[in-house]
Amino acid sequence: MLRIRCPWCGERDETEFRYRGDASQSRPAADAGLAAFSAYVYERKNPRGWHLEWWLHVGGCRALLKLVRHTVTHEIRWVGTAQDQPSLPQEPGR
Amino acid sequence: MTAEPNPEPVPTRAARESSGRYSGWRLLVEGLGGQRGWRPAWSKATPRPRYRVVIVGGGGHGLATAYYLASEYGIRDVAVLERGPIGLGNVGRNTTIIRSNYFLPDNIRFYDYSLKLWERLERRLNFNTMVSQRGTLNLFHTEAQRDLFTRRANLMRLLGVDAVPVTREAVKLLVPLVDLDNGRYPVLGGFLQPRGGTVRHDAVAWGYARAACQAGVDIIEHCEVTGMRRDARRVTGVDTTRGLIEADTICLAVAGHSSQLAAMAGLTLPIETHVLQAFVSEAIKPVLDVVVTYGAGHFYISQSDKGGLVFGGAIDGYNTYGQRGTLPIAEEVAMEAVTLMPGLARVKVLRQWGGVMDMSMDGSPIISKTPVDGLILNGGWCYGGFKAIPAGGMCTAHLIARDAPHPVAAHLDLGRFAAGLTLDERGAGPFPYAH
């Protein structure tokens, strides 16, 4: 069970949240062309390590949160709002 | 499909110790001789510096691809590189179900081709993989779901694939364990695919490894790929923990880690890695002789020949490479089991494990060339890779040998995403965690 520290509601079980995928994807400019949009919609870095991702607190404040989580250890290093732009840790997870 | 003569001379190599032919007669003879005549089913090869084809990943798809390359397409200068020992990856971690009850006609054709290969597999491999066509029963619980399942069954029957409607009463006769009248999700009926069933998964790995080895393939265990060599246009070899191995063609069959290997060649794939859990109960007397899927959740169950109930549910739902799984899904799977079959409430779970898999962006697999010449991808199997092993191997071998997709797998091309031709069985959109 992941325990996610929501900035508004405090630490809650993962079952209150819904995963919404990779948060490092950013929408290309309108004139960026087909290849850029195809990559935006379909391609994922899928790292084995630290991952920036969206979680929706659907069973709580309903805010969309950004997390930095490790995809092997599941350690959650950082939780913030959708506007925050955290940098990913360099060291391996616990 | 006719075998064609080997277009190249078989390179000389150390004599391969043969495991011989398996038969009832051999069993008797070996029994009388104190079981001293058995030899290892496949040889532990040491890597040579160069092969025509290197297959990364000694799981079901990698071994099947190697076997069909050698036996069907006459390419024997092949190495299979496996990071650990054969059989400990996803080929030994699944719930062993085979079926072809899909929705999209192209997928129905592909998976039914696989089912037909399963039906002839034991004779072909000379190995008892325990293919058991005990039937796959999909239950429905609402009228809308009945309509959807009926539509799927009709699509299957139009393509000559078996799908039989089963009434509520017949469901009870077929699976007495099912509680038809649970208050929340009463069972209204089901569809049975009589040719569906289970296969002994470990035997599939061993059988293909043995047959590939006998056909001349080098199976190299404990050999992890650490880097990919390429020039501007094409791949030239792989760096491994056992040295550089050069190849004309490199095939990735490492579902769960496809993104990691593709990244070594500078590619980004339409794949996320997720974990799927599976469970086995203590062994009990025979209570379940078909594979049953529950329509009101994501749950499937069968009984192994040892008596254990083998079951599973949905993926955990977030990117992970952790081969273990977490408790919320374990709880959900247990709830679904007891809702469908209340009699299981006091059966103890013996083992639980997880396997990591490629969840593709549309929920369908990828057998394709890539933007890098000479690099072939077999991946994106989501949680349906096991049933597809024979067809996946045959079609990947065809793609490598003929430089063109196999007719039943042409739709699985990587280019379908950019072209807007996604194969979205469930209509869930480009969200891997939703498939």
Image (cartoon, coloured by chain):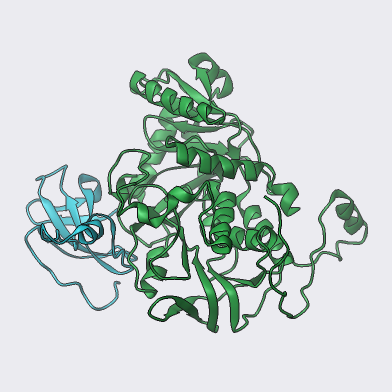
Chain colours: A cyan, B green
For the point 42% across and 79% down, which residue is it?
B230
The percent position of residue B75, horizontal first and vertical second, equals 65, 67
The percent position of residue B50, horizontal first and vertical second, equals 59, 81
**Does B153 appear above or below B99?**
above
**Does B284 appear above or below B409?**
above
For the point 51% across and 32% down, which residue is it?
B292
Left or right relative to B357: residue B347:
right
The percent position of residue B309, horizontal first and vertical second, equals 55, 40
**Do we see residue B310 in this rendering?**
no
Say which of A9 and B107 sits in front.
B107
Left or right relative to B110: residue B227:
left
**Do we see residue B164 in this rendering?**
yes
Quadrant in the rendering for residue A90: bottom left
Left or right relative to A4: residue B15:
right
Q: From this viewpoint, which residue is outermost toward the top? A: B169
Say which of B199 and A15 sits in front.
B199
* Image quarter in which the C terminus of chain B is found: top left
Say which of B67 and B304 sits in front.
B67
Left or right relative to B35: residue B329:
left
**Callout count:** 0
Say which of A22 and B312 sits in front.
A22
The percent position of residue B167, horizontal first and vertical second, equals 50, 16
**Does B347 appear above or below B399?**
above
